[in-house]
Amino acid sequence: MKEIVEEKFKEIFGTEGRFKTYFVPERTEIIGDGDQKIPTTRRKKGVYATIRKREDKILNFYSVDFSEAGIISISLDNIFNNENNSWVKYPREIVTSLKEKGYELEHGFDIVYYENIKKDIETKLPPTLKELTIIILADMFGLKLDNEEIILLGTSTDEERKEEKTYIPTGEKLQIL
C-alpha cells in the first residue's frame, strides 16, 4: 500500500524534494463496559498519505480514491473562505482549526491520500482522514499537540466532541513509513 501512495505522489507531484509517508489504521473502535475500555484497530486497513513541503503557501490535495476530482489547490491565505465540499473538506477543516487556534502554518504542501478501508465515506473515512492529517501537520510544523487537542481538532460538532472523549489515540497507531 505504501508503494501505491508513493508512486502516485511521484506521478502527480514529481520526484524532486524530500517526501514522507504516513499511515493510520482504520478508525479505532472502543469495546468494553463501564470504565474498562479496550481500543481495537485493524492494522493493515487505513489511510496512507505522502506529503512534501512547499516553499509557497499553496496546499495541493490529491486522493487516489477520488482521482476524478484531480488536484485540489487551496491557498493558506484563503483557507477560511474556501467552501470546497468534496472529500478535501475534511483535511481543510483541520488546517482551518489549527489556524483558528493560533498555530503557525508558514508554508504549503503537496499531499496524496490513499485509503484501503471499506468505502463508507460517512463513518469511517472522515475521522481517519482527519486524524492522519492532524498527526502529519503536527509533525511537519513541529506542533506540540496532546491527545485531547488531537481529539478536539478531529471533531466537527459539539455532539461529536462529546462522543469522542472515550477515544484516545495511541503512539502505536501512527506509522511514519
Image (tube, rainbow, N blue to C red):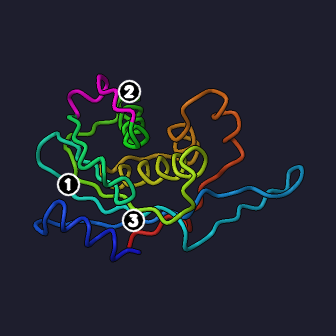
Local SS, label 3: strand
Per the model, the C-alpha gap separating discs 2 and 1 is: 21 Å
Q: Which residue is at a point 80% across and 56% down the rendered structure image?
A: 37
Task: Name the main secondary structure of what is drawn in magenta.
Answer: helix
* Residue drawn at (62%, 69%) of the image: 42
Residue 125, x across and y down, in percent: 52, 51
Residue 137 is a magenta residue: no
- The Cα–Cα distance between marks 3 and 1, rounded to whole angstroms, is 14 Å
Spatial CA distance of label 2 from label 3 is 25 Å
Magenta residues span 76-85
The residue pinned by badge 2 equals 100
SS at mark 2 in the image: helix
Disc on res. 5 = none
Residue position for label 1 = 53
Q: Is residue 66 left or right of residue 37?
A: left
Q: Earlier in the sequence, mark 2 or mark 1?
A: 1
Q: Which residue is mark 3?
A: 22
Disc 1 marks which amino acid? Lys
Q: Residues within 10 Å of mark 3 (few under 14, many from 20)?
A: many
User: In front here: 95 or 61?
Assistant: 61
